[in-house]
Image (cartoon, grey):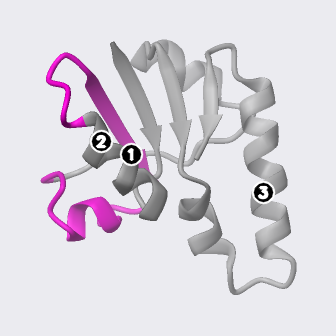
Amino acid sequence: MRIWLIGADDAGSEALRQLQKNPTIEVVVTDMIEQPKAVTDRLIDKIDSIETVTQMNINILARRIRPDLILIDSRALKRNLSRLSGGMVYAEAFHNEIAAASDFPCIII
């Protein structure tokens, strides 16, 4: 099984810990920054690529990555938008739009 993890902050790191228990699962990790929590906590050496995923490009990126399942770390985007007024609400709505636009199974964690 191939899983695409978008964002490797708190929830993404916890999911990654669990997914690493099964060697048959391949996890492709992308984030908007080079050193997300999963890298600083040394769960992984590095992310596979730096990507800004939107509802406009999720299917293009997913066709390149070919995941069986997409996991979106909700805190990763909130981390970057938390300083903006209404940023948390915007981030939640943004994730819902990405999941709705995806042609692949998508879970927000």
Tell me the residue that label 3 is attached to. 92
Measured Cα–Cα span from mark 1 to mark 3: 19 Å
Does the magenta run of residues contain 33? yes
The circle drawn on residue 36 is: none
Q: Nearer the viewer, residue 88 or 16?
A: 16
Quarter of the image for the N terminus: give it: top left
Q: Residue at x 58, y 20 (%)?
A: 60
Left or right: 4 with respect to 90? Answer: left
x, y percent for residue 106: 62, 27
Tell me the residue that label 2 is attached to. 18
Q: Given contact means CB atoms under 8 Å apart, are the residues at marks 1 and 3 in contact?
A: no
Comparing labels 2 and 3, the label whose residue is closer to the camera: 2
Tell me the residue that label 1 is attached to. 15
Disc 3 on helix, strand or loop? Answer: helix
Left or right: 97 with respect to 108? Answer: right
Quadrant housing residue 105: top right
Does the magenta run of residues contain 31? yes
Comparing labels 1 and 3, the label whose residue is closer to the camera: 1
Q: Given contact means CB atoms under 8 Å apart, are the residues at marks 2 and 1 in contact?
A: yes
Q: Amino acid at mark 1?
A: Ala
Q: Which of disc 3 and disc 2 is earlier in sequence?
A: 2
Q: Residue at x 14, y 63 (%)?
A: 42
Q: Which of disc 3 and disc 1 is earlier in sequence?
A: 1
Disc 2 on helix, strand or loop? Answer: helix
Q: Residue at x 28, y 60 (%)?
A: 38
Q: Amino acid at mark 3?
A: Glu
Label 1 crowd bin: few (<14), some (14–19), many (20+), radius 10 Å: some
Measured Cα–Cα span from mark 2 to mark 1: 5 Å
Magenta stretch: dominant secondary structure? loop
Give the magenta part as a residue range: 20-45
